[in-house]
Image (tube, helix red, strand yellow):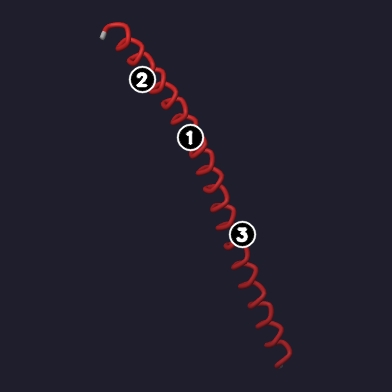
């Protein structure tokens, strides 16, 4: 009767909600992995930029030194 129908409806809603939660959880996991990867890439870029800055500063220092020696 109605109790069986209500029980089936509740079960169907529960399954739908469970599937929605699982999908949402997978999306959150995926987003978290992307955020971690992005953070790692950003760190690598910052490190590369730091090394490039050091190289540029050393080169500028050498140019200044040579300019003083020869001009």
Look at discs 1 and 3 and give the one toward the viewer. 1
Task: Please identify the quarter of the rendering in which residue 4 is found.
Answer: bottom right
Look at discs 1 and 2 and give the one toward the viewer. 2
Residue reaching furthest top? 70
Say the numbered circle drawn on residue 7. none
Left or right placement of residue 38 versus residue 16 in this view: left
Task: Please identify the quarter of the rendering in which residue 63 is found.
Answer: top left
Residue at the spot x=41%, y=22% of the render? 57
Q: Write down the residue under mark 1.
A: 46
Residue at the spot x=59%, y=53% of the render? 29
Near-viewer residue (70 or 1):
70
Say the numbered circle drawn on residue 60. 2
**Local SS, label 1:** helix
**Cα separation between marks 2 and 3:** 52 Å
The image quadrant where one finds the C terminus is top left
**Cα separation between marks 1 and 2:** 21 Å
Near-viewer residue (60 or 13):
60
Say the numbered circle drawn on residue 25. 3
**Local SS, label 2:** helix
Left or right placement of residue 52 versus residue 20 in this view: left
**Badge 2 local density, few (<14 within 10 Å), some, or many (20+)?**
few
Q: Where residue 38 appears, x then y in whole percent?
A: 50, 44
**Cα separation between marks 1 and 3:** 31 Å
Question: Relative to residue 31, is residue 50 depicted above or below?
Answer: above
Question: Relative to residue 6, is residue 14 depicted above or below?
Answer: above
The image quadrant where one finds the N terminus is bottom right
Question: Relative to residue 46, is residue 27 depicted above or below?
Answer: below
Left or right placement of residue 60 versus residue 36 in this view: left
First in sequence: mark 1 or mark 3?
Answer: 3
Residue reaching furthest bottom? 1
Q: Where residue 41 appears, x then y in whole percent?
A: 49, 38
First in sequence: mark 1 or mark 2?
Answer: 1
């Amino acid at each position: 009767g109605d109790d069986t129908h209500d029980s089936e409806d509740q079960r169907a809603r529960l399954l739908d909600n469970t599937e929605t939660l699982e999908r949402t959880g997978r999306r959150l996991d995926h987003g978290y992995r992307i955020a971690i990867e992005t953070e790692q890439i950003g760190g690598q870029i910052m490190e590369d930029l730091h090394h490039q800055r050091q190289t540029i500063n050393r080169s500028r220092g050498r140019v200044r030194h040579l300019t003083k020696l020869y001009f």
